[in-house]
Image (tube, helix red, strand yellow):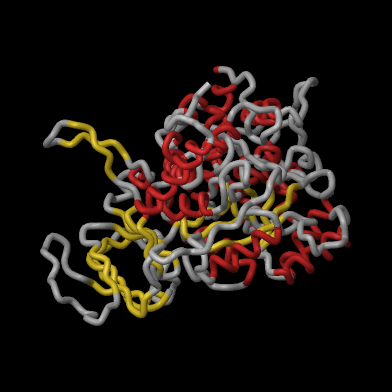
Amino acid sequence: MRSLRTYLGSAALAAAFIAPVVAALAQGTPQPAPGTFVAAERPEKSTAIPAPARQKGEGMGPFRRLVIRGVTLIDGSGSPPRGPVDIIIEGNRIAEIKQAGTPGLALKSGRPPYDADYEVDASGMYVLPGFIDMHVHGSTADKAPDLSYTYKLWLAHGVTTVRGVPLAPFETSLSEKARSARNEIVAPRIYAYQRPGEGKGWTGGVVNTPAKARAWVDWAAKQGIDGVKILNTPDQDPDTFAALCDEARKMHIGTVSHLSATGEGRMDAVEAGDVGLNTVTHHYGHFESLLKNGQIQDFRPDYNYNNEQDRFGDVADLAAQSYDPGSPEWMAYLAHQKANHVVFDPTMTIYLASRDLMRMRNADWHDKYTMPQLWDFYQSSRENHGSYFYDWTTATEIKWKNFYWKFMRLMNDYKNMGGRVTTGSDSGFIFETYGFGYIQELELFQEAGFNPLQVVTAATLNGALTLADPKGEVPEMGTVRVGKLADLVIVKENPLQNFKTLYGTGALRLNEQTHKLERVGGVSYTVKDGIVYDAKKLLAEVADMVAAEKRKRGLPDALVRP
């Protein structure tokens, strides 16, 4: 496997190679701003309970013909907003997008088509493609009563497609994927990526050799998985990792890796890209590829990876140990990954508590929408993954702030170079509640330097392309186009003006007439597969679920904060 130094070559050659890119990026690189990052991965501790069947009244449609009237379109391609338009949906596909009038003039009534089965009056509202969360785990029984809790929170925030990495144990993931495709449950569209060796029908044991890697990928692909989630643990040595990627490519399924620190001494992000990995998720592997003193981080002598405060606290030390933004090594790394068509899925939101624990513990949505058992899971614990705040200090948070700035700069530079970056949340850990965490990721992308339309493209088209590419397909979602699947988000507030208005709890704004603060925003409607879901109703159902769990446990309405 090649190291950064191998492909970088001499400093002079590197400088010549990346000088034009440095100049091109200089205009678009944000100035240093606070920021940081780390990733969450956990063993399955309990069963994921399948969602109950979709009931009558849960969503409307699909219809023979549905019309969304008078909306401003943000189509996901990077095109600026345009409208007003009428969007005609037949079944689960977009059939037409028609100009509905002229900005500044009143809309004319009685516009064709005249034979719609259902209409949504979206005059003055905005429509976007359904959001794609590229890194999810569904709630297990120790976090929520069943998967409908996560599904409804995702849909209520406009997420119409998720990539489970994994969503749930093997058989549950595939079953829920099929049920969602048939719209038998209230759920986003599901792509199932599973870990090597998973599946009750697999009889080959631990996947720790290239031969076993190929055999498991062949078997799992035939069961219907969409991709492989690789943790480069000691079981997945470089040859086994390479075999997983190669066989997945042959079987036309995707690969994504959380490059665990336990394996990065032999397989960093550069080497993973060289053997065909599709997506690097979280921050792992990036800065290990950019270390000034070789491939292995300079760990404290008393560091213990299994002590999660060490694992998550000390990873921020990579900011000081790696090459600086804009350096020849930095730019060569990005260029190399782009040449290998590697996708970056940063999941910045899942580490947000690391740079500001108080903020995340006291987020607006916890009391009403965070399940009490999920809240318990978040609390500092030696057992629960990601509950690592045993003695979290100001100094640690400052390290994380510095790390976030550097990590954000890496993502923005990659985007500016033409690399693909996607949005994922990894919610359900570290004070990140499903749905809400995804909207935070959009805010963090803007902080990183993406302009609002670039954020939307990362959240829609980029995810769709990444899911479709391994299959050799043209994506069926990700943009609002004729012929695409009818996956849409309809909102009253302009999200390009303020992504905070996408939160289920809305955003605070001073009413200039009453001079009082009021909450505005939230998603109005989410359309998945031509089915119209009232997002506010979904949130109310989640709030009722949370309240019922609190009553069952004899808990007060407000969460008990230590």
On the image, the x and y values in percent for residue 110 come to 15, 76
Q: Residue at x 30, y 46 (%)?
A: 521
The answer to whether any part of residue 299 appears in the image is: yes
Q: Residue at x 33, y 60 (%)?
A: 127
On the image, the x and y values in percent for residue 373 come to 57, 37
Q: Residue at x 50, y 60 (%)?
A: 188
The answer to whether any part of residue 406 appears in the image is: no
Q: Is residue 411 left or right of residue 314?
A: left
Q: Residue at x 61, y 43 (%)?
A: 282
- Residue 147, compared with residue 441, is above or below; it is below
On the image, the x and y values in percent for residue 218 come to 78, 68
- Residue 182, compared with residue 176, is above or below; it is below
- Residue 490, compared with residue 550, is above or below; it is below
On the image, the x and y values in percent for residue 24 come to 48, 48
**Quadrant in the rendering for residue 527:** bottom left
Tally of numbered discs: 0
Q: In this view, which residue lies farthest toward the bottom?
A: 115
**Quadrant in the rendering for residue 403:** top right
Q: Is residue 16 left or right of residue 303?
A: left
Q: Along the line of sight, which residue is nearer the eye, 288 or 231?
A: 231
Q: Along the line of sight, which residue is nearer the eye, 213 or 322?
A: 213
Q: Along the line of sight, which residue is nearer the eye, 421 or 159?
A: 159
**Quadrant in the rendering for residue 83:** bottom left
